[in-house]
């Protein structure tokens, strides 16, 4: 039987949480490219939080798509991707109260209107290893603003479908495709998909399936991990693969691996190139000997 890679233990975050936005804003990735620099930044951030203590709330939760502006996301060494990003997403810092948690949970839990670092990391990997997607069909699960899907467009994917449950964010993702694939924006499509209620006709025919399925920071709870595995199983061609980027401190990669194994997939977890705070998960379909 194939080996299913699993994390040895639950990994602890390196920075104390401060609301949802610890890992959410657009950041200068060069600032975090070495572990020493990242540790210095974490220590500085914690000192600042300890000094202030008080909760600060800026904004009203979920971003308004009408506030979005085209933003160039640096992917390193001259590579970039253009995204329409809302500018009014709530930023919560300090000692977060239970009232604030309740106020923003629905808006920011699993939110797609933020450029999350895992998305930037996976987009960077694709930008610098374009053979992963070049001349291939690509599906991005939980696309949000579509940073990974749009990076795939720039890297030469033959077609890209970005799926999410948030229609406003999908419209921005499709709008971004005009900037990232001006030669042929029809290579990009979007699909409204609730992974907890996958339609019966989703990717039924082989011609509707994809060579590569990508996703970033989607294994944020056990339900999501199981649902993502089901989407991967339904949407990927027999000789295709899935590539996921997951923050190191997440604890549901094992759930994804277990469900995927039952669906006939082998998963391998590895260090993420250039990012100590991320994990790379690759899934491929295998023939399992049940004898």
Image: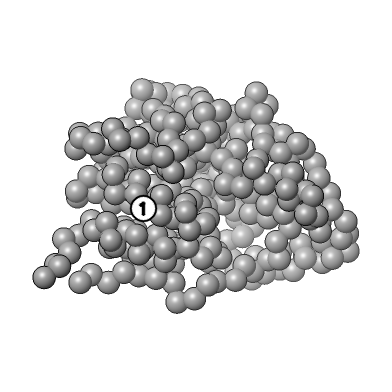
Depth check: give the residue in front, 133 or 109: 109
Q: Is residue 129 visible?
A: no
Tell me what residue is drawn at x 79 percent, y 50 percent: 99
Residue at numbered disc 1: 229
Secondary structure beneath dot 1 equals: helix
- Residue 173 relative to residue 237: left or right: right
- Residue 34 relative to residue 213: left or right: right
Quarter the C terminus occupies:
bottom left
Tell me what residue is drawn at x 67 percent, y 36 percent: 62
Examine the rendered structure and indicate whether residue 52 appears above or below residue 111: below
Image quarter of residue 231: top left
Q: Is residue 228 visible?
A: yes
| Figure coloring | one colour
Tell me what residue is drawn at x 68 percent, y 52 percent: 20
Residue 71 position in % (x across, y down): 60, 34
Residue 249 position in % (x across, y down): 56, 65
Residue 184 position in % (x across, y down): 36, 23
Residue 286 position in % (x across, y down): 20, 60
Image quarter of residue 51: bottom right
- Residue 85 relative to residue 254: left or right: right
Q: Residues within 10 Å of mark 1 (few under 14, many from 20)?
A: many
Depth check: give the residue in front, 68 or 217: 217
Image quarter of residue 200: top left
């Amino acid at each position: 039987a194939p080996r299913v890679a699993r994390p040895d233990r639950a990994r602890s975050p390196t920075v104390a949480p401060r609301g949802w936005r610890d890992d959410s804003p657009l950041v200068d990735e060069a600032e975090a490219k070495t572990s020493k620099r990242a540790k210095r930044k974490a220590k500085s951030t914690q000192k600042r939080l300890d000094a202030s203590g008080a909760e600060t709330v800026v904004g009203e939760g979920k971003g308004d798509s009408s506030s979005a502006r085209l933003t160039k996301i640096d992917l390193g060494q001259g590579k970039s991707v253009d995204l329409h990003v809302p500018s009014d997403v709530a930023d919560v810092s300090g000692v977060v109260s239970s009232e604030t948690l309740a106020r923003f949970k629905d808006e920011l839990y699993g939110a797609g209107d933020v450029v999350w670092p895992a998305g930037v990391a996976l987009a960077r990997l694709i930008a610098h290893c374009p053979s992963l997607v070049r001349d291939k069909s690509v599906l991005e699960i939980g696309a949000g603003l579509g940073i990974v899907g749009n990076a795939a467009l720039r890297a030469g994917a033959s077609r890209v479908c970005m799926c999410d449950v948030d229609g406003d964010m999908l419209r921005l993702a499709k709008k971004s495709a005009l900037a990232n694939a001006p030669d042929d924006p029809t290579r990009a499509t979007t699909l409204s998909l609730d992974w907890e209620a996958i339609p019966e006709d989703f990717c039924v025919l082989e011609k509707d399936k994809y060579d590569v399925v990508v996703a970033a920071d989607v294994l944020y709870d056990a339900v999501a991990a199981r649902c993502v595995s089901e989407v991967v199983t339904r949407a990927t061609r027999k000789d295709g693969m899935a590539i996921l980027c997951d923050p190191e401190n997440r604890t549901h990669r094992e759930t994804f691996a277990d469900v995927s194994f039952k669906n006939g997939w082998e998963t391998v977890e590895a260090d993420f190139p250039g990012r100590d705070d991320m994990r790379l998960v690759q899934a491929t379909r295998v023939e399992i000997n049940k004898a």
